Amino acid sequence: MNESILQTLCGLKVSGARLVAGKAGISFENGTTLAIFNRFTLTGIAPADAGLLVGEAVSGICEAPNTISIEFGSRASIRIDMRDNAYTGPEAMELCSPGEPIAIWN
């Protein structure tokens, strides 16, 4: 089985974060950005404290059919609901990495 493109985030440090419902975004030290449009839940951090993720590295990614979880070194995590009824558009998620094609989750 091929490794998921999201696994490329493992080890990258967060350089910016905005965790607002309907349009969340996380940027990373190498210029990669992840936009999250689907509903999500946070553990270990409040949306207003998104700046606390800056400097934290992604420590793990867990992908299941209905959810994607991204864990950070501080034990904070974001769980993205990938079910159809969680969709808010324009897509579920968008990953932009320098020099790579844009990856879209619908």
Image (cartoon, rainbow, N blue to C red):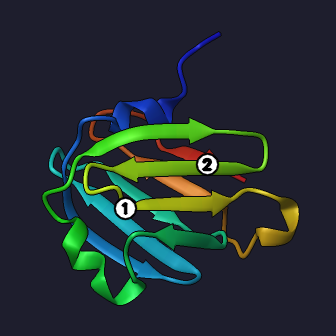
Q: Is residue 96 above or below residue 99?
A: below
User: Which kind of residue does numbered mark 1 sit on?
Assistant: Ala
User: Which kind of residue does numbered mark 2 sit on?
Assistant: Ile
What residue is shown at x 63% (from left), y 38% (from top)? 63
Splitting the image into 4 quarters, where does residue 58 fall? top left
What residue is shown at x 37% (from left), y 75% (from top)? 45
What residue is shown at x 70% (from left), y 72% (from top)? 89
x%, y% of residue 90?
A: 66, 70
Local SS, label 2: strand
x%, y% of residue 74?
A: 26, 57
Q: In this view, does 36 lie above or below 75?
A: below
What residue is shown at x 44% (from left), y 59% (from top)? 77
Q: In this view, does 19 lie to the left or right of 92?
A: left
x%, y% of residue 36?
A: 53, 65
- The tag on residue 27 is none
Q: How many numbered discs?
A: 2
- The tag on residue 76 is 1
Splitting the image into 4 quarters, where does residue 50 fall? bottom left
Splitting the image into 4 quarters, where does residue 48 fall? bottom left
In this orientation, which residue lies closer to the viewer: 2 or 48?
48
Q: Is residue 31 above or below residue 15?
A: above
Query: How would you rate the neighbour count of disc 1 (Cα within 10 Å): few for under 14, some for 14-19, many for 20 or more?
Result: some
> Which mark sits nearer the N-terminus, 2 or 1?
2
3D distance between C-alphas at marks 2 and 1: 14 Å
- The tag on residue 68 is 2
Local SS, label 1: loop
Q: Contact (CB < 8 A) between labels 2 and 1?
A: no
In this orientation, which residue lies closer to the viewer: 64 or 89?
64
Instruction: Locate the N terminus and report the quarter of the image it occupies.
Output: top right
In this orientation, which residue lies closer to the viewer: 62 or 104?
62
Q: Residue furthest bottom?
A: 48
